[in-house]
Amino acid sequence: MLEKKKLKVALLWHMHQPYYFNPETQKFQIPWVRLHGLKDYLDMPLAATRQKNTRVTFNLVPSLLDQIELYCQGYTDNFQDLSLIPARDLNFDQKREILNNFFSAYYPYMIKPYPRYRQLYKKRENCKADLNLAIKTFSSSEWRDLQVWSNLVWIDPVFRNEEPVAELFAKGKDFTEDEKKNLLDFQIELLRRIIPEYQKLYKSGQIEVSFSPYYHPILPLLIDTGSAREAIPDLEMPQNRFSYPADAEWHITEAINRFHKLFDRKPDGIWPSEGSVSEETLKLFSENNIRWIATDQDILNYSLIKSGMNPKKYTQHTAYIYKEAPQTSLFFRDQGLSDRIGFVYSSWDHIRAVDDFILSLKELGRFLKDNLDNMVIPIILDGENAWEYYKNDGTDFLNYFYQTLSGDNEIEMITFSEAAEQIKPTMLSDLYAGSWINHNFKIWIGHQEDNTAWDLLYNTRKMLTDFQERKPETDSTLLEQAWRQIYIAEGSDWCWWLGDDHVSEYNFEFDLLFRKHLGFIYNLLNQKLPSRLEQPIHKDKADMMMISPEALVTPVLDGRITDYYEWSGAGYLICSRLNQAMHKSNQVLYQLFFAFDYDRFYIRLDFEKEFDLVGSGKIKINIDFRDLFIKEFYPGIKKREISGDFEYIYDKIIEIGINRKSLLPDGFGKIEFSVAISDDDKSLERWPADGWITVDIPECKKEIFWQV
């Protein structure tokens, strides 16, 4: 009897953090390498190898491994240093920094479950408007407990039965300085276990390890920034064309060398930074004997069209090659399945989530059954940032996921190298230049701030090459240090956080670090530092008038801020800051949030404390979706209304929910809206004052927010 063919599934977890090390201070500016190292980088390979038949690929960025090693050598980050200071010795500024930063964790799963941490969080929140007052109310014991808990919650559940961690969780409060130091020492011990574990598992054949270009650059843009115009022909470009294929080559060859040093062999595959590819990039990979790469399914669709092939006649669930680089197989990420793990399943029961995933795989298998031998489902996603949004840091989900996937007799888990070996590829005559985010490079180039960064990079690089020509006798070690800073500044993360695409409470730090890396080159060579490198690229937050949504959001419509993260990821308009620019004295609306999930569009209105919304009962709110949908209501008369596709409620704030299909027939597309406030038909405010707030709502099946 013939053995039943199985559906091949190739799973890749991408591990990456920006290069946070400040060359001037010799410290990490922010702590995410350390904290994700404690929570994600070690337990992930361990979880993947608990079951017998699991085959998983881990993509490790060389600059991430460098940073882990720096921590192991004794280098520290600013938050680590603040944690080490005895609580009784903290000065006023240090205490303020602690209150600002030591609650940077997902509240529902990383703060709320722990009574002492939750108590300290609420104490800070009660005085958030006046942190100076809050500082005076914290005792030395509370400062110490906060130092401990802000580090303790990042220890992955897998390691919480180890000492001293288990004892600290059991104790809960009133920690000693010795206990705090033991915890911080344990963190470094945990970091020291990460790289050896990958080495052991890769050598044993239990996992595959792939890599990315060294400092995570967008290679097509290093080769030629003009490649951005393939997807967006009228994209605004920097003043100077950046085109240095040799730099792209460096990021590939040095990553290969780093990989060889760690694993005693060269890598087979690469996940290009942000899935960014172009024809010239593929040629570089092929010339460096890379057997496979992966990118996004949209790149395949556009490459098929560019190649004169009908996308409806081809599937993403197989291998392809580009005719000018035929020895390198291409795989294309299944967006829907990958994004379910990254964004959808975190709010589900873990058994229901895994069962849904397996069912979807089997439905695909039935669709592909006629050619199953030559098919593979590429599941590719972030291996670190999703798990804090899962209960128990995703441990329950991952254990059941691997157990079910590896034990199913219709599914075969394989690595990408195995897929490249087993699957006969289809040839593409042309390859589309783009990334896995909207199949273009707009995140990293085109905005005024992004373009400024590219010009600063160009000018600094030119200064360095001119300096070398003028002074060929310069010490080679010095030049090597200078070039290293260029390569770091070529990383993708700086422009990720510039422009209006993304916002973070650490935008300033990313801006600062980018300029520090470039400025360090001038200092190394004893050259005058351009004044432009001393000025922030990013607009001051007071001038950031509107931020677009960054994630799907499903708020609880109760007229209250249910928890700190309820509207996290929403777009917003900070009206009070706009007011500063307009010099308006009588402010009504403080800030306006807008967001959406798969079913509804949401609006939240926060009012200035001095404004009496109830008033005479004649305060009217007008929500205008450019005449497509207009709703007026009087919150002072009626605090809640549910009618058809529209719902609002007013308590402390106003929260509004509207069915997406009542705004757009298909439920997706571009919407424009405004919010107007009047009193007895006398206009008080309209936001925005002119024009409309514009929001692009994607198809329900399409996820546009996945971040690496």
Image (cartoon, grey):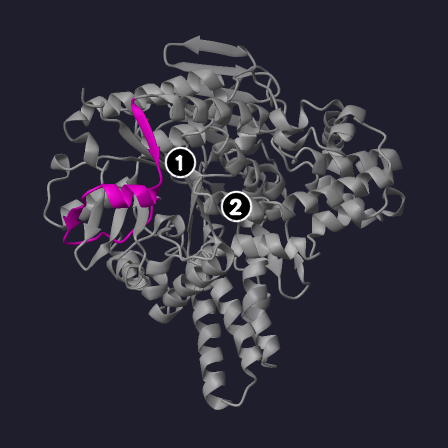
Label 2: which secondary element: helix
Query: Which amino acid lies under the numbered mark 2 shown in the image of this protein?
Result: Lys
Q: Count residues near mark 2 (Cα–Cα under 10 Å), then give few for <14, some for 14-19, many for 20+.
A: few
On the question of residue 41 being in view, the answer is: yes
Closer to the camera: disc 1 or disc 2? 2
Q: In this view, does 363 lie above or below 163?
A: above
**Where's residue 32, x and y in %?**
60, 46
* 428 inside magenta stretch: yes
Nearer to me, 79 or 76: 76
On the question of residue 133 being in view, the answer is: no
Taking the image as shown, residue 504 lies to the left or right of residue 595, namely right
* Residue picked out by circle 1: 55
Taking the image as shown, residue 88 lies to the left or right of residue 211, namely right
* Residue picked out by circle 2: 200
Q: In this view, does 480 lie above or below 200?
A: below
Nearer to me, 465 or 607: 465
Query: Which amino acid lies under the numbered mark 1 shown in the image of this protein?
Result: Arg
Residue at point 47%, 43% (across, down): 204
* 433 inside magenta stretch: yes
Nearer to me, 54 or 254: 54
Magenta stretch: give its range: 410-436
Taking the image as shown, residue 141 lies to the left or right of residue 543, namely right
**Where's residue 257, x and y in %?**
45, 63
**Where's residue 256, x and y in %?**
42, 60
